[in-house]
Amino acid sequence: MVGTVETKLTELGITLPTPATPMANYVPFVRSGNTVTVSGQVCFGNDGKLVAKGRLGEGVSMEDGQKAARACAVNLLAQLKAALGDLDKVARVIRLGGFINSAPGFGDGPKVMNGASDLMVAVFGDKGRHARSTVGVAALPADAAVEVEGTFEVV
Amino acid sequence: MVGTVETKLTELGITLPTPATPMANYVPFVRSGNTVTVSGQVCFGNDGKLVAKGRLGEGVSMEDGQKAARACAVNLLAQLKAALGDLDKVARVIRLGGFINSAPGFGDGPKVMNGASDLMVAVFGDKGRHARSTVGVAALPADAAVEVEGTFEVV
Amino acid sequence: MVGTVETKLTELGITLPTPATPMANYVPFVRSGNTVTVSGQVCFGNDGKLVAKGRLGEGVSMEDGQKAARACAVNLLAQLKAALGDLDKVARVIRLGGFINSAPGFGDGPKVMNGASDLMVAVFGDKGRHARSTVGVAALPADAAVEVEGTFEVV
């Protein structure tokens, strides 16, 4: 049987990628009690390439930044699926932390980050409504345009 | 009846603003178990204007930066009040995350962030003493000088 | 009796420093339930001097950056030891947050951060495998090259 959340993913035309395996001494997620902490996910697409590379407010457009944020959210879901087996076990998206590769003074990080937030709500409904912090950083792994980390309450 | 913490706020001459409503698919706070996670708050004052705009180590003075950090803390309290109804339900300020809009090499972020930390201890006493991380970021929403996020243990 | 983790520290030739006392209204760690949140630790060595100062991708080499990240991890352990008395009470390293003082476009933050992650796994074994977010920031306290924060599940 396919769960409610995965049915929704199918409706949205989203295929979860094979979750990225960290190439170092850390893991993609840790469960402690009813909380799952997922490592920061950069904006790799399902083809293994960065959806957007470089800085917002400079080379990367708002539209591409939002696509990148959405890709980070899809990658978070892929890790969660690996963690839980069934995405219906997500009781609440607690928090997303958004890191936007930004030229100095770029003030539209929240608009970029909506690409990730909108996806969470599209997929999980009210359970997807989360606390959020968005900041503009000087650099990201592989010069990715966006990185998003997440914490989730699970059953 | 007015609670202990709100009496303290009055003594300190602090009026909590109407908490900001996020203009996107996220929420100002999420409770999970006994923990409340509050979204990153930028340094809007009660008049709805940024207390300080731009970068520390460049256009923004230390004094204005500290005022900005304090404003972020006041905004966290306003969100907490909305979350809990009564600020006396805060058992402990667990963590503040401080993001300082910084010119490269600006090393005095912790001094800026004291504006937020000092307020928490003034308001909550020993329960206000928190873990903290302070970093200097390349950009913040609306070019705000400071953003602070918080996690709180509540009863 | 010396615990398992401290025996491992001795084998690795690591002496924990006297944990740094924050010079402000915050504390080095907060316990809430079974979770200990440790404040961001910058890369001070046991001699009280920064292991590396300045930016990766500019003045600071990869090797020095990794040493700096390792020093941050050692400082996290020193704080944990102060929090718990006995490091064997650590049930799991839940998350490390790595902030790398970075020149714009520096994409090798994760490689720097491995200095901290490798130490956690060397010291705690499988319990040391953690979720992680690594970002490149514009500035850090005292112009340190690296800052790392941590959350830990404890018994």
Image (spheres, coloured by chain):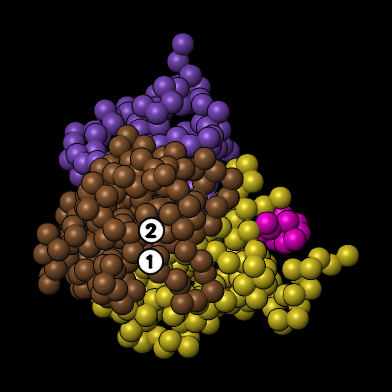
Chain colours: A purple, B yellow, C brown
**Residue at image point 29% right, 58% down:** C15
- Is residue C89 or residue A52 the one in the foreground? C89
**Residue at image point 20% right, 69% down:** C52
Inspect this view and state whether residue C60 appears.
Answer: yes
User: Which three-letter amino acid code belongs to the residue tagged 1?
Assistant: Thr
**Residue at image point 40% right, 32% down:** A80
Q: Is residue A139 above or below residue A78?
A: below
Q: Does label 2 or label 1 sit earlier along the sequence? A: 1
User: Which three-letter amino acid code belongs to the residue tagged 2?
Assistant: Ala
Find out whether residue A149 is within the magenta segment. Answer: no
SS class, disc 1: loop
Residue beneath disc 1: C18
Q: Is residue B77 above or below residue A121?
A: below
Horizontal side, residue A93 vs residue C112: left or right? right
Residue beneath disc 2: C78
Q: x and y percent of residue C117 in the render? A: 27, 47
The segment highlighted magenta reads B80-91
Q: Dominant secondary structure of the magenta stretch?
A: helix
Residue A39, located in which quarter of the rendered image? Answer: top left
